[in-house]
Image: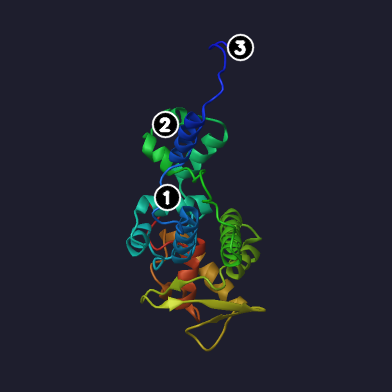
Amino acid sequence: MSDFGPKRPMSEDALCVSTDTVKAKRGRPKKKPDYDREKEIDALQRRVINLFGEPFDDRVERSEEAPSIREIAKALDTTPLTVRKMLITAGYYSTKHSRKVQELYEQGCTIQEIMEQTGLKRASVHGYLPYTKGNYNLPELPLNAERRRAYRRRIAVCERLMQEINSPNAEECLWDAILAFAGYPFVTEKGLPLKYTVEGGEIFFNRKEKSVTRATVMRAFHQARTIQESEGCVSGPKKLGTFGASYLYPVFLRIGVCSKKSEIF
C-alpha cells in the first residue's frame, strides 16, 4: 500500500488507453525529418569563418579590404549579431568588451554581476559570450587552424617590435615581423592589392620583379623612425626615400613602425 491507497490491477481497456496516451505524447512526426539544426549551424559557421578570413582584434589594425560583419550577414542572409557571436565562438573576434565579458564569466561571475561591472545591458553581455548550447564549436579546420596560428604570431611580433623599437634589438624584431606578415594582404597608397614572400634576406613583392633586400628594409626603417619621432607621422612612401618605398610603406604602417596621421598634439 502506498500513500495514495492500494494499487489496483489495470484493466485491458485502461491499458490500451494508457498505451495510446504514451504514443500521443511522443509528439507529431517532424515536418522535415532530414533537417539537422546542429549541422546547419556548423555549416553556417564554416561559411562565416571562410568569408571573414583574417581574425579581428581591436588591438591590431585589420586590412581595409577585409569584409565587415554587416557585409557577411547580408551575404548569408542572417543578422550581424549572429555572425559576430559565431566569430566569437570560433575565436575570430576580439574587442575590449568581449575580452572583459569573457574574463569575468570565466571567473564565475553571473550575467547580472557582469552587467554591473561593465555597464553593459543583458543582451550585450550575452552577445559577447560564445555559444554554449548544441554543437556550435566546430572542429578546427586545418586552414582555419593555420590562419589562427599566423594571426597569433603576428600579434606577438608586433607587440615585441613596439617594446624593442628603440633598442639595439629593433632590427631583429623588425625582420621577425616581416617574416610573420609574409602572405598578408596589404594595400598600397594607390589602392592596389599587395603581398610578398621572403627568401633568405630578400623580399619579393607580387607587384615588383626585383627583390627588396634586408639592408634596404633596415635603411627605410631607420628613416621612418627618424621622421616619425620628429614629425609625429610618415605622411607617404616618398618620405622613406628608398627603393621599394611604395611597397614597404603599407607594411610599416601595418606592423607599427610609423603612422600615417600625426601623433603629436
For marks 3 and 1 on the same chain, the one whose residue lies earlier in the sequence = 3
Badge 2 local density, few (<14 within 10 Å), some, or many (20+)? some
Amino acid type shown at disc 1: Pro
Disc 3 secondary structure class:
loop
The circle on residue 115 is: 2
Task: Give the CA distance from mark 3 to mark 1.
Answer: 40 Å
- Looking at the picture, tell me which residue is in the foreground, 155 or 140: 140
Q: Which residue is mark 3?
A: 1
Question: Which residue carries the number 1 mark?
Answer: 29
Number of the front mark, 3 or 2: 3
Tell me the kind of residue under disc 3.
Answer: Met
Q: Position of residue 246 (x, y in %)?
A: 44, 77
Report the front residue among 259 and 112: 112
Residue 82's x, y, as percent? 39, 51
Is 61 positioned to the left or the right of 214 in the image?
Answer: left
Question: Relative to the observer, which residue lies in front, 243 or 157?
Answer: 157
